[in-house]
Structures are given as structure tokens and as C-alpha cells.
């Protein structure tokens, strides 16, 4: 529960050696993908992207371990041979792993993000709300902390924060899914039935779409699922590769009374595509002419999501909503880059074609759902609160050997509500669901803290491993006609100074700033004299361990004339979720500090600008832990919960 009292502080300023390094001219890790995909050297660029930008861990398979902590280049990324996106990346260089302790591993486990009790997890599957319970299914390996033997894990919650683990929902036990029950989506029909479509990998490793449904709709926990005897219901069409056809979406009802779904694929290896299938009974499907949408140069589209948003609304829409005042969001997870992209556009319900509002910001070459460590996102319509909820998978960036040692890998983000940003008309707004605020404890307020150029300010809040931070920044009157050479994007991280930034907060830092993760704004002069702002996260000094991935992430964020710079940051041990300007730009980071853990974790303000001071106002809550545990079937609580539904 949230404490009613709060305290205010006026911290003393001190100057600290925050990354005052000369600006480097090396390539930046997050250059625009549009240039890469459109270039004549696409294949070479793709190799560079996979090596330098993929959000998959730079890890090898356990079979490639030659000595304790030493890795070779022989291993193939896990999952590729099975016809799914890479779930690991072979190490490019032999290197000795960090000597992690059990205490360090224990600290890395999150306190209020969903993750299984043990073993591997990836994509969220078929989220839905039924008889008072939120259901989350997820890709799960019940046998190991690395990808394989993919089944459907299952958990339920009353509030999207406190979760109960349930028995496995679906296991690979039929010829049409024996090599994996892969990602799928739920559709709630008007008569109350629930249908689940999912990808199965057959005994011949062909990707097909299968139908499943609850054995007992009156069961609020939906414990038992039946697979349709006539599976598969959709097989790869002519011209589509057998192993590049997966992840059916939630269905929507067309004006002709039939249902549509989309399935992700590719043409000619490089054209990312969403096919449309039509059905009246969910067991027989017809491939419609043409495609919902396709974008050359974006490669295989996984985990496609397609849903409506209200232009002038404050609530979410059911997936079937059509008509005036509605835009449609098309999102795809790009297998080549392991990044989720989206675009906003118009859906023609007669031709079943979708057109982006801005072709230069099309799917795969423009906006990202999340600019950090994030993939395979999926939304659903929460009919109980009239909102659209977004889940996303956050994988590890340490080695597979470390994951096997600690016994688990991957988490899900805090569920986010999604709305159309009617102020910009170009972005979505993502925001943590309101229920997470129930975990807030004592609040500490800092008002009008002046952070001088080139300085760091400690924020005295005690231990800083579980936080909810709201921060707003004002900068001094802008210096006109700056002649400083300013490079666009997030630069080389918090070290890359310019006139107006970077400035923000340092999370999961120790007292000496030997480990820290800056979350920051970086305003830049552009040719017309205005500012262009980037919202960024810098992991490069987040850990002293050499065998974890540490990158600079971020993207452009609109800051309108009547707005200050504002951010919200959720800190939960090894994950940091950052929301810039009300959620227009979002970044998820994984960090693995070796010293800034437990009681040594601290929080700071920083301003590494060269020409302006910054004034900051913050409200910071310590966050309680969520209750995430097996469902108490044998307890009286179970009977009470079922009765309450």
C-alpha cells in the first residue's frame, strides 16, 4: 500500500567525474534502420546489425563451452535450426566469464515483474480477461533455463501485478506441434466462447496454425485446454517458406460478418509481410487476395499485432472496433534485428489493406514499440476496464552458462496501457497499468533541485533497487546559434556532451559511481534553430562484468512547446523501464551490476550538458514486492477467490 506521508529534500550539489571523456567519432549503436534496410549493401548491414545491435545475449550454447567460462565461435544461435528467431547469440570472442556469486544471482531476480519460478520464458501468449481473472500464457521450457521444448506456461492475476502460477496450459504432444507450441493469440467471441490460435512446429518442422479452446468455460481459471481434432487449421500457402509462417493474431470481425486474422511471414527473404485469412467458424480459413501490408527490406515479421485506437479517446478499443475516429496500429517483431516496430495508419475494411499515415515511418523503418531490450510484444483488450494492455518479453543479456547457473531466464514487462497520442498525432502512449501504483510505499519529494552543468546530485532515499520515479526537468534559456558539433541520436551515451545535455537520473548506481545506468534526455540543435530531443538509456557502465551486453539505447521523442522534459522510471533490480514524455518513447534495460546491489544501490541526478543548468522536480516511491507464487488450490483462499468470481 502507499504511504500517505512524503518528505522533501534539498540535496547538496557535488561535482563528480561523470564520464568527461572526449567525444568519439565511432559509429553509434542505434542508427536509423530505414537507412540500413534501404541501402544497397543490405546484406552487409544486416550482418553488422546482428553482431552489434541484436538484443539477444552474446552467449553461446552450453555445448560450446570448452572450459569453465570460456566460449568458442562454433555454436549456432539457439532456435535458428528449429525455424524460429534466435534465442541466443554465439560469442564472437573467447572470454572468461565473470565470477558471479549466488548473492549476485539472487539480487538479479525481480521483485514485482512477472517471471516463472524457474527455467526459460519468452513470448507472451494469448492474454485475456475472463470471469474476474487476467490470464497470461507464455512460451516456456519446463526443463531448463535455455530455450527448447516450448510449452505454454500459464498464470492468473486479479490485478495484473500479483500473479499465481497454474499448471501448463498446452504441451507439444501432437504431430502438428510436437516440435513446439509456439506463439498465439486469444479471441473472445460475442457468445462468450474463447478460441486460441497458436503456431505449432510439426514433426517435419513445418509451421502451421492450430486451434485450441477451454474445456470448461465456467472455470474462471481455464485450467484445461482442448486441441481441435482437425488441426492444423492453416498451413503455409504456396510460395511461403515452411519455416517462416507463424504467430496468428487476435481475430477481428469484418463488416461482412466473417472473422479475419493475420499471420506473419516474408517474401523473397527480405519483404516483411502480414497475410490475411478469413473464417466464419475458426476451423476453415481462406487466404484473401493480396496482403494486409508488406515492407521491403524488413525481413521476417514475427508476432504481428493489429488493433484499433481511438483518435480522441481516453479508453482502449475492442479489436473488432471499426468506423470513423479510429486509426489502426500495425506492429511487427523483426526477426532480423530483434526489434518491435509499429506504425499508425488506416485500415480499409473492404479491401483488407492497411496504409501507414507516414510511409517514411512505416513498420520496420520507423517507430519502435520499445527502444531497449524488448521483443515479441502482444496486446489484448481488457473489457473490464475498457483499455488495451500491452505485454512484452525482456530477455537476458548475460550468458547462457550464467542462466543455467542461476536457474532462470527472462521476464515480462509491467503491463502497459496503450492510447493514441492525439497531441502529436504520430505516436502511441504507453504507460504502466495503474495497478502497479498499489505497490508504492513511502514517497520522497525533491523540488526545484538545480543541477549545474557537468555535475551530479545524490538523492538521499536510501536503498534504490525497487523504485517508481516521476521526474520533470527544465533547462535554462537556450543558448542561441550554438556552433558545437552535435551528432544526432543518443551519441556514445552519457559521455557524449553537447550544449543542452545529456541530463537525467542515474539508477542502480553505487556511491563511487563505478557502476551506474543513466536514463536521460539529449536535446540537440538542428538547422532551423529548434531542438530535437532524444530519450536514452546508457548501459555501458551498468556492470563491471565483461560478459554481459551493455549498449546505449534510445530514440527521438517529441517535446511540445507547452511541455517540460518528463520521465517515469520503474526500477526493479535487473530491469529498468523508462517512459519519456508520457510514454511517447519507451526504453527497457537489463543491468547486472556487481557492486551497486542490495543496500549499495543508489540514485542520482546528473547534468552532463556543457552550456546549461537544469532544474529538476521529482517524486520517488519505494516499491513493495509483488506476490507471485503457485495457486493455493488446497487453501480456503482458493474457494473464496472462485466464489468471488
Image (spheres, grey):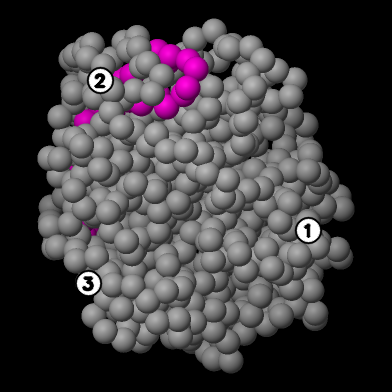
Q: Is residue 386 left or right of residue 614?
A: right
Q: What label does residue 14 carry, if any?
A: 2
Residue 567 appearing in the image: no
**Mark 2 nearby-residue class (10 Å; few <14, some 14–19, many ≥20):** few
Quadrant location of residue 91? bottom left
Q: What label does residue 39 carry, if any?
A: 1
- Residue nearest the viewer, comparing 312 with 611: 611
x%, y% of residue 548? 35, 61
Q: Using the image, determine if residue 184 lies above or below residue 136.
A: below
**Mark 3 nearby-residue class (10 Å; few <14, some 14–19, many ≥20):** few
Q: CA distance from mark 2 to mark 1?
A: 47 Å
Q: Which residues are magenta?
A: 604-631
Q: Nearer the viewer, mark 3 or mark 2?
A: 2
Q: Which residue is mark 3?
A: 405
Q: What label does residue 556 carry, if any?
A: none
- Residue nearest the viewer, comparing 117 with 29: 29
Element under disc 1: loop
Residue 359 appearing in the image: yes
Residue 447 within the magenta-colored segment of the rendering = no
Amino acid at each position: 500500500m502507499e504511504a500517505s506521508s512524503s518528505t522533501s529534500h534539498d540535496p547538496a550539489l557535488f561535482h563528480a567525474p561523470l564520464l568527461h571523456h572526449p567525444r568519439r567519432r565511432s559509429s553509434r549503436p542505434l542508427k536509423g534502420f530505414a537507412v540500413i534496410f534501404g541501402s544497397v549493401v543490405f546484406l552487409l548491414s544486416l550482418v553488422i546489425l546482428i553482431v552489434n545491435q541484436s538484443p539477444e545475449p552474446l552467449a553461446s550454447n552450453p555445448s560450446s563451452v570448452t572450459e569453465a567460462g570460456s566460449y568458442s565461435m562454433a555454436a549456432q544461435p539457439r532456435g535458428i535450426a528449429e525455424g524460429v528467431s534466435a534465442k541466443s547469440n554465439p560469442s564472437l570472442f573467447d572470454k572468461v566469464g565473470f565470477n558471479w556469486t549466488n548473492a549476485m544471482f539472487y539480487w538479479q531476480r525481480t521483485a514485482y515483474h512477472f517471471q516463472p519460478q524457474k527455467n526459460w520464458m519468452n513470448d507472451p501468449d494469448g492474454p485475456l480477461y475472463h470471469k474476474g481473472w487476467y490470464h497470461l500464457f507464455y512460451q516456456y521450457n519446463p526443463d531448463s533455463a535455455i530455450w527448447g521444448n516450448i510449452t505454454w506456461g500459464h498464470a492468473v492475476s486479479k490485478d495484473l501485478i500479483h500473479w499465481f502460477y497454474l499448471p501448463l496450459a498446452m504441451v507439444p504432444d501432437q504431430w502438428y506441434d510436437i516440435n513446439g507450441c509456439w506463439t498465439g493469440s486469444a479471441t473472445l467471441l460475442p457468445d462468450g466462447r474463447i478460441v486460441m490460435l497458436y503456431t505449432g512446429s510439426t514433426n517435419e518442422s513445418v509451421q502451421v496454425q492450430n486451434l485450441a479452446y477451454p474445456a470448461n468455460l465456467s472455470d474462471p481459471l481455464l485450467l484445461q485446454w482442448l486441441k481441435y481434432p482437425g488441426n492444423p487449421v492453416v498451413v503455409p500457402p504456396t510460395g511461403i517458406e515452411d519455416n517462416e509462417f507463424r504467430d496468428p493474431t487476435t481475430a477481428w470481425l469484418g463488416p461482412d460478418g466473417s472473422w479475419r486474422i493475420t499471420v506473419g511471414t516474408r517474401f523473397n527473404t527480405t519483404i516483411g509481410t502480414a497475410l490475411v485469412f478469413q473464417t466464419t467458424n475458426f476451423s476453415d480459413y481462406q487466404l484473401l487476395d493480396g496482403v494486409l501490408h508488406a515492407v521491403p527490406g524488413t525481413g521476417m515479421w514475427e508476432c504481428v499485432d493489429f488493433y484499433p485506437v481511438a483518435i480522441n479517446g481516453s479508453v482502449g478499443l475492442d479489436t473488432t472496433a471499426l468506423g470513423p475516429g479510429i486509426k489502426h496500429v500495425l506492429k511487427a517483431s523483426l526477426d532480423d534485428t530483434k526489434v518491435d516496430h509499429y506504425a499508425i495508419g488506416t485500415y480499409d475494411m473492404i479491401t483488407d489493406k492497411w496504409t501507414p499515415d507516414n510511409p517514411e515511418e512505416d513498420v520496420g523503418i520507423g517507430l519502435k514499440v520499445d527502444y531497449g531490450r524488448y521483443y515479441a510484444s502482444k496486446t489484448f483488450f481488457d473489457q473490464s476496464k475498457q483499455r488495451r494492455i500491452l505485454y512484452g518479453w525482456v530477455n537476458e543479456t548475460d550468458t547462457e552458462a550464467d542462466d543455467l547457473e542461476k536457474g532462470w531466464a527472462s521476464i515480462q514487462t509491467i503491463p502497459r496501457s496503450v492510447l493514441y497520442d492525439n497531441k502529436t498525432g504520430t505516436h502511441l502512449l504507453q504507460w504502466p497499468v495503474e495497478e502497479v501504483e498499489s505497490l508504492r510505499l513511502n514517497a520522497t519529494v525533491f523540488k526545484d533541485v538545480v543541477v549545474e552543468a557537468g555535475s551530479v546530485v545524490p538523492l538521499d532515499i536510501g536503498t534504490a533497487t525497487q523504485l517508481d520515479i516521476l521526474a520533470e526537468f527544465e533547462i535554462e534559456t537556450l543558448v542561441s546559434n550554438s556552433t558545437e558539433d552535435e551528432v544526432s541520436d543518443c551519441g556514445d551515451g552519457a559521455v557524449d556532451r553537447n550544449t543542452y545535455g545529456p541530463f537525467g537520473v542515474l539508477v542502480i548506481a553505487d556511491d563511487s559511481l563505478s557502476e551506474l545506468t543513466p536514463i536521460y534526455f539529449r536535446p540537440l540543435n538542428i538547422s532551423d534553430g529548434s531542438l530535437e530531443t532524444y530519450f536514452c538509456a546508457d548501459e555501458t557502465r551498468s556492470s563491471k562484468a565483461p560478459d554481459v551486453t551493455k549498449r546505449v539505447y534510445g530514440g527521438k521523442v517529441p517535446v511540445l512547446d507547452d511541455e517540460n522534459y518528463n520521465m517515469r522510471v520503474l526500477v526493479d533490480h535487473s530491469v529498468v523501464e523508462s517512459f519519456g514524455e508520457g510514454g511517447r518513447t519507451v526504453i527497457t534495460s537489463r543491468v547486472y551490476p556487481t557492486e551497486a546491489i542490495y543496500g549499495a544501490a543508489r540514485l542520482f541526478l546528473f547534468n552532463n550538458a556543457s552550456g546549461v543548468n537544469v532544474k529538476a522536480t521529482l517524486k520517488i516511491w519505494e516499491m513493495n514486492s509483488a506476490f507471485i507464487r503457485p495457486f493455493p488450490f488446497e487453501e480456503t483462499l482458493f474457494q473464496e477467490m472462485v466464489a468471488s468470481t
